[in-house]
Image (cartoon, rainbow, N blue to C red):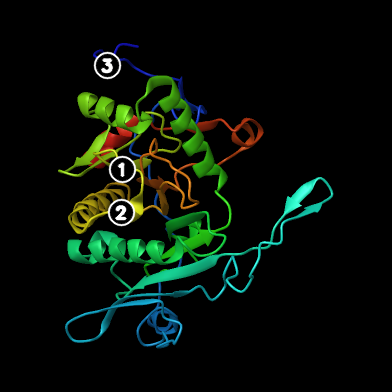
Amino acid sequence: MSNNKKEKIFSQLRKDLVSGTWVIYSTERKKRPDFSKEKAAKKESAEDLKKCPFCKENILDQEKDLLVYLKKNKDWSLKVFPNKFPALCANYKNINNREHGPFEVIDGVGHHEVLVTEDHQKDIPEMEIERVAEVIDAYQDRYLALMNKRHIKYISIFKNYGCEAGASLKHPHSQIMAMPVIDPDVFRSLSGSENYYKSHLECVHCVMIEWEKESGKRIIFENEEFVAVCPFVSRVPFEMRIYPKRHLSYFERITDEQKIKLAEAMKFCLSKLKKNLNDPAYNLFLHTAPCNGQAYDHYHWHFEIFPKTNIWAGLELSTGIEVCSVIPERGAEMLRE
């Protein structure tokens, strides 16, 4: 298909340049889709707000606070503390690698933390840029504190928004998980990036960014340091990725100036998601080079935003090929409006 000609697309398959996976795009919808959370969902009552464990009235001044940011009036604006229900346990001293029949088993060594911001009603779209940058600064702070812990190979930073995205509490928060393994999604991304570099002597993400900038069709936001796009091979409608425009492999090396610019991009993208798509649930997460002591200079760190706009059914589960109902070019156009 020509890049210059606007053709009507009924169905199309696109292959991801990094992972090698295929995505099917079906006929575009004629009407603006509504991917908002269920309208019948009960709104929070005053009583519900009183019970929120992350609100200032209820959250304990814990001895276990790992990071606290204070405002000029000495009240806190952001806190990080251990997850009360951790998926991984910091008490294990060894991973205890062992065989269980044909399977490999290790103990769940790691760290699981929660980052909470002060205002129950203000999430990233409503926060000032400086407060969003403060969240990014806290991500970096905890990443640096965890990366050299024993047995830690990868640190996952993610945010679940809405119950459909796995958020059990409405109060704005993120999670930080330091793991003894590299997760499969990041492993595929690393492998694809390395293979492309070996074949072309270029970063695959840099190539995609330059191509997206030339095309302009899928760009949502751009400033001096970052660019946000709906990827050419989006796995779900309105998927977004925020990339540093320069080739940078390690998120933990982000500068204060870059934090402000990243905050601008993150706030813009999530605000568009809220205003233009009627506030759908989403997952936001970081992909960065692991902290396992190996070199990953071929990699390009970035944040991914996955709105909960797709349901996996028989085809997806049986083949691993996802079906996306909105072509990325149209998705970017709707988000820019």
Q: Nearer the viewer, mark 3 or mark 1?
A: 1
Asked if disc 3 and disc 2 are in contact, CB closer than 8 Å, the reply is: no
Residue 31, position as x, y percentages in the image? 34, 35
Q: Which mark is residue 253?
A: 2
Distance (Cα) linking label 3 and label 1: 34 Å
Distance (Cα) linking label 3 and label 2: 41 Å
Asked if disc 1 and disc 2 are in contact, CB closer than 8 Å, the reply is: yes
Amino acid found under the numbered disc labelled 2: Arg
Residue 330, position as x, y percentages in the image? 31, 31
Amino acid found under the numbered disc labelled 1: Leu
* Sequence order check, earlier mark of 3 and 1: 3
Asked if disc 3 and disc 1 are in contact, CB closer than 8 Å, the reply is: no
Residue with the mark numbered 1: 248
Of 58 and 65, nearer the camera is 65
Residue with the mark numbered 3: 6
Q: Residue at x 64, y 70 (%)?
A: 92
In this orientation, does residue 318 appear? yes
Check the image and report above or below for 322 versus 125: above
Distance (Cα) linking label 1 and label 2: 9 Å
In this orientation, does residue 25 appear? no
Q: Secondary structure at mark 2?
A: helix
Q: Residue at x 50, y 43 (%)?
A: 186
